[in-house]
Image (tube, grey):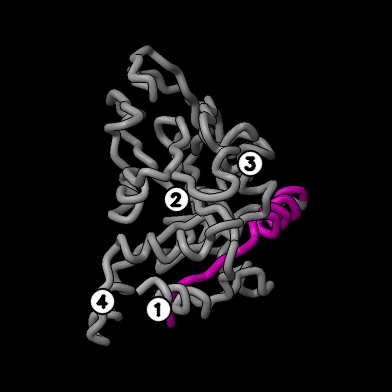
Amino acid sequence: MQDVLIKHWSKSGLKKDDNILLHSSFKRTIEDFKKKRITITHQNILDSFLDLTYPNGTLVIPTFNFDFNDGADYDYYKTKSQMGILTEIARNHPSAKRTLNPVYSFAVFGKESKLFDSIDNKSWYSKESPFAIIHNLNFKICIIDLRDRNSMTFAHYCEEYFQVPWKFYKKFTGRYTDKFKKTSLKEYKGYVRKLNEGVLTTLDPAGDLLWSKNLYKGFKPFQENGLRYVYAKDYFNLFEKLFKNNDSKPYYYDIKK
């Protein structure tokens, strides 16, 4: 089954030993295979990406949970991913290394997983976060059947990197139980939209621009296998160019009228 799925993803240009950050929705994938009388599970899909990146690549899967921002306690072992079935399977995988931020955590597998282990970035998207490793190692940011607005979290790393004026730091404090099962009060911060100024996150126009510049490879959502990717450095460089030319709007944000 893994071989069938690896061939399926390879249609978009994924290769053995890639470094991959994966944002995904697999509902259509499972349905399409079912129409072919092939039964696949989310576990099969995860295994296919693990096989694809093994032994010299690295797979990073979001296990984000936003409840800490609303005052909920965080537990390294018990707080579930809110990013879908596959991400929760990944979080519980015995080989996964989960980064420590209570909001934007990742399950990481493979050769460079040690670089992500024990990262406890106090600011969600900072230069000390997993996003910086993804940037520096030039991961393929892969998205399956999702629009940019609902998946391209890497854009927020770029926003914090350049300290964009449409965002500001907001602090969040809560009870945090760490991997040693010790509970303490911890403070984190997010670089968030200036809602009082009507700031909206867009990102879909930036995705269209990536396609027009041939920086996205693969297929658009709900076409073929629905998998597209962009190299992290290509995304970052385009963001930097637009920002420094004062052209970030409407690609990354807009103002509600």
Residue under circle 2?
A: 61
234 is within the stretch colored magenta? yes
- From the top left corner, tell me how far across and down residue 116 is, in percent: 55, 38
Which is more N-terminal, label 4 or label 2?
A: 4
Graded by Cα atoms within 10 Å as few (under 14), some (14 to 19) or many (20 or more), the crowding at tag 4 reads some
Judging by the rendered image, the residue that carries numbered circle 4 is 31
Residue in view at x 45 percent, y 18 percent = 187
Q: Classify mark 2: residues with Cα within 10 Å, few (<14), some (14-19) or many (20+).
A: many
Foreground mark, 1 or 2? 1
Of label 4 and label 3, which has the lower sequence position? 4
Measure how far apart labels 4 and 3 are at the Cα level.
Answer: 35 Å
Q: Is residue 73 above or below residue 204?
A: above
- Quadrant, the N terminus: bottom left
| Cβ–Cβ under 8 Å for marks 3 and 1 | no
Mark with earlier residue (1, 4): 1
Front position among marks 1 and 4: 1
